[in-house]
Image (cartoon, rainbow, N blue to C red):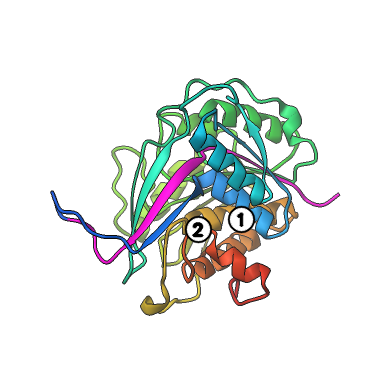
Amino acid sequence: MPARLVCCGLTTLDVTQVVDRLPAPDEKVVADGLDVTFGGPAANAAAVAVGLGVPTTLVTALGTGALADVVRAGLVAAGVDVVDLVPDVPGVLPVSTVLVTRATGERAVVSVNGARVPRLPRPGADVLTGAGALLVDGHHADAAAVLAAAACGAGVPVLLDGGSWKPSTPDLLAVVDLAVLSADFAVPGRVVRDGQAVDALLDEVAAHGPRFVARSAGAGSVRVRRTGADGSTDRSWVSPVAVAPGDVVDTLGAGDVLHGAMAAALARGVDPLDALAEGVRCATASVRHPGARGWLAALAEGGPAAG
């Protein structure tokens, strides 16, 4: 059987428009690019993993309605197997509005995330059957915690996509093996301004349980902290290949690509540090293409997308 990945977390409907600049207050600007598709950290990661050849199941909340139908169809077209925890509940799917600045590829995002999703039923642990890894994104925390605890008990590595600190983060960290944090991730009351503060952040997160903690930094190097079997601490960096500013098309979802590619590698049994390097490589390739998954089309055609 091929390696298989399970992702648990947020799915959204993303409405993305490309603009020359962000509007000022009370100003209207005209966009010359529009895309309506599914998004969300776990959903994007799942599609990335499938694009890299790893069969993937997404445990999420879509519900019913026209918007949910659009998203469900997109996920199916991407080859993702979907377990919808609230298949009969209307109006729960979050919508994200994304403005991408053409010259820089930078994006501005407005989203309700999982605020409209009711308390979710517990997913069955049988969804992990045959899984080589589990990715959780910090959303739908109760469902994620159930699967993470089951995965830990079965010896399946659990990767947290740490986009931001949430009230449930400490409980989730206690049942994950690896945590890769965004550059925006911070513990409440702590300020991360330099390398020493980054190491302190990694130490604090590791104290909650993960043996492997890393923090991305946009186009910069990813700082890594690993705990050895003897309790020793090893620190290192994973550096991406530089991308010329003029080659950056869209940074949207680059973090999701990193996590999805890393999780796919973990599912194949790759060492965590090498899996992280694979995630960084794919994320760097993705910013040369529009959207979180635009580079996958070039990859499927044998182009330089993942180079």
User: Magenta segment range?
Assistant: 1-23
State whether residue 243 appears in this view.
yes
Q: Secondary structure at mark 2?
A: loop
Identified at 58% across, 61% down, the residue is 279
Identified at 64% across, 69% down, the residue is 299
Q: Quadrant of the C terminus?
A: bottom right
Q: Tell which circle, 2 or 1, labels the residue nearer the N-terminal end.
A: 1
Residue 154 in picture, x, y percent from top left? 76, 34
The amino acid marked with disc number 1 is Val
Residue placed most toward the observer, 6 or 247: 247
Looking at the picture, does residue 263 appear above or below residue 58? below
CB-based contact (under 8 Å), mark 2 and mark 1: yes
- Residue 225 among magenta residues: no
The amino acid marked with disc number 2 is Ala
**Residue behind mark 2:** 292
Instruction: Specify whether 226 is left or right of 30.
Output: right
Identified at 69% across, 35% down, the residue is 152
Instruction: Specify whether 110 is left or right of 204.
Output: left
Classify 10 Å Cα crowding around label 1: few (below 14), some (14-19), many (20 and above): many
Looking at the picture, does residue 277 appear above or below residue 47? below
